[in-house]
Amino acid sequence: MSSDATLNDLAERINSSWQRTTQGVLETARLCTQAKEERTEEELEELKSQLDFSRPTFTKLAKIGGNSKLHEEQVSTLLPPHFSIVYQIAKMDDEQRDLAIDQGVISPGMSRTELREWVASQSGTQKKDEKEKTEVIATLKATQAFSAELKAKVIEALNKLKDEFGFLLDGPPDPARELKQAVNEIDQEIRGQTRRYITKLKKQRLHADGNRRLTKQEREVRWPYTDDQVKIASDVDWD
């Protein structure tokens, strides 16, 4: 199960299921979760290097694949064909997700903006409902000497603590953080599209005449590029 050939087969299965359909997203997510559970760290790194999408996307898909509720027919038929939205749904608890379904928020045609606005509205409602139940355990005030860079680091650290301990964190909207998240998603999409194009081009050149049993020399003539030469660097500049 740990041979290169098997890893290549698994990468091909994942890439072939990576389509802009809901079932394609769910199948890809299932395979990513299975690989994460069954493969060693070394094998996972080798597998990720062969995939048509980035490592952060693999992590998000594994999160989707690990949420069994999303794969149930009564839920899966309502999911949109966009992994980034399905990932946000995967992060919901059962109560919040069921409420979103009951209110018609989760549907195949839903948008990321609609989901974000609904979650924000529920957060506001929850804060009102829990006002008597919550307790302020700390107040953070920054002096004018706080630089923007230091402030950003503090907010990032607080958000990590919030995710770890589950407390409520109030603060002003952070347009810069939202913009950074949007840019990261666009970057991942560009990388994925580029990898898919390279993979498709490679297959076309290698098997143009239908011959799938090529010698090593024949393969090198038809595709004279190493994996490192077509690899998309993490710091690549799209400009």
Image: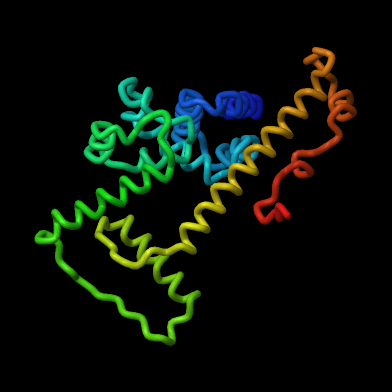
Q: Is residue 71 left or right of 214 when viewed as pictured?
A: left
Is residue 40 visible to us here?
yes
Furthest residue toward top:
210
Residue at position x 76%, y 41% in the image = 230
Is residue 1 visible to us here?
no
Q: Quadrant of residue 90?
A: top left
Q: Nearer the viewer, residue 140 or 68?
A: 140
Residue at position x 59%, y 42% in the image = 189
Question: Number of labelled discs?
Answer: 0
Residue at position x 82%, y 18% in the image = 208
Q: Nearer the viewer, residue 57 or 11?
A: 57
184 relative to 86, above or below: below
Residue 225 horizontal/vertical position (percent): 82, 37
Q: Nearer the viewer, residue 61 or 226?
A: 61
Residue 17 horizontal/vertical position (percent): 55, 24
Image quarter (top left, top right, bottom left or bottom right) of the C terminus: bottom right
Image quarter (top left, top right, bottom left or bottom right) of the N terminus: top right
Residue at position x 56%, y 44% in the image = 55
Q: Quadrant of residue 26?
A: top left
| Colour theme | rainbow
161 relative to 58, above or below: below
Residue 142 horizontal/vertical position (percent): 36, 81
Q: Is residue 121 left or right of 131 when viewed as pictured?
A: right
Residue 52 horizontal/vertical position (percent): 63, 35
Furthest residue toward left:
132
Q: Quadrant of residue 209?
A: top right
